Image (cartoon, grey):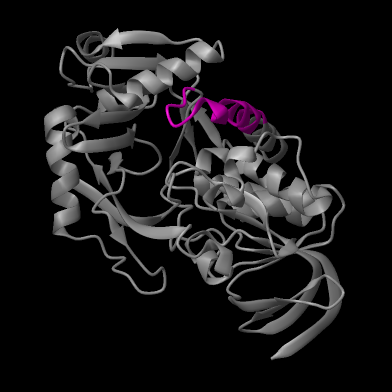
Amino acid sequence: MSSNDERRDVIVVGVGGMGSATAYHLADRGIDVLGLERFDIPHTQGSSHGITRIIRRAYYEHPSYIPLIERAYELWDELAEETGRPVIHRTGSIDAGPQGNVVFEGSRRSCEEHDIPHEVLTGAELNERFPGYDLPADYRALYQEDGGFVVPEQSIIGHTEQAQAAGAEIRAREAVQDWVPTADGGVRVWTDKAVYEAERLVLAAGAWNYKLADALSGLAVPERQALAWFQPQTPELFEPETLPVWNIEVPEGRFYGFPVYDVPGFKLGKYHHFDETVDPDDYDTDPGRADEVLLRDFTEKYFPEAAGPTMSLATCMFTNTPDEHFILDTLPEHPQVTVGAGFSGHGFKFASVIGEILADLTADGDTDHAIEMFRLDRFE
């Protein structure tokens, strides 16, 4: 194993959605950055793949996310302009469920509190306006025209290329094995290829984060997810121009999905698919018949014209916190180490602003963004 004598300002562990954005924001400030990724850039082994990821201004999870999503939109648009890559697509978004359901009511509350333009539709009105849907007539749906999807692979490529253009060094297929604090307040990092030192460390390793920080044990827990792409029987109903992205609560659970884009098929998934906690280094990454049946049964009931032949199945991972809110902080015993973890299945849309926040915490020790609800000490 080689030893690299050059001491960096910052090492970023993980160059996926959050890590690539962090490397970009640090490098853009003139900071010497080394990014280390155990797989390819981009790759399909973690939580930052799958062609499309929902972005929406209406946010039922908590109104406190709204200022962050507003900034995320700005930064996604800036990245698209800087790179020429169409990383964000606006299709409109739907949050729906039975009357009184948290998905609908929480989204409506966030829009009302933050003056976000929106429409409230019955299930019958939704089905008439967007005939790909077939929800019960008495359901309630919130439509927000600025919702849509981010393209994860292209955004990772864009952030990585911009980081490199600003001077960052990015290394793929180099797995971080361990790190220790140094006597002078920095860090020493071991990979399967070399040893590095830096003033600061950022842990943005997704499902692997808990293996690199004891403080995350039990607080950033990987979960197996599955996705399906079904070929619509009436394709014109499921194009980006005719089908908003959606989150829907039904008796079978909470599901989410997308119009057809870039690859064949109407894409969907179920939050907390089978509630399977996993080790990211040892779990079943091959989607099976049970995964397909769960997602097809839902599609046949609520999007029947989309329930044609299976085009593709895939797995990914959520990394869940106990309250399903993010962890954005420095480690209490090691303030030179910044952590972005536990994005709980709804984080990718924020990757652009998460990168800015983690860069702030790393470079300045604090951030102007309101992140108190994401601090580690809330679990004490």
Is residue 36 positioned above or below 31 on the image? below
Does residue 7 appear in the picture of this structure? yes
User: Across the whole image, how many numbered discs are drawn on residues?
Assistant: 0
Q: Nearer the viewer, residue 318 or 127?
A: 318
Q: Main secondary structure of the magenta part?
A: helix
**Residue 152 image offset from top left, x and y in percent:** 51, 46
Q: Which of 371/25 is in front?
A: 371
Residue 226 sits above or below residue 74 on the image: below
The quarter of the picture where the N terminus appears is bottom right
**Is residue 299 shown above or below 70?**
below
Q: Quadrant of residue 33?
A: bottom right
Location of residue 138 in the rendering, given as x and y in whole percent from the top left corner: 18, 12
Q: Looking at the rendering, which quadrant does residue 291 occupy?
A: bottom left
Q: Is residue 65 magenta?
A: yes
Residue 282 x/y as whole percent:
36, 74
Can you see residue 145? Answer: no
Residue name at image x 64 percent, y 47 percent? 158
Q: Residue furthest front?
A: 380
Q: Bounds of the magenta span?
A: 58-74
329 on left or right of 166: left
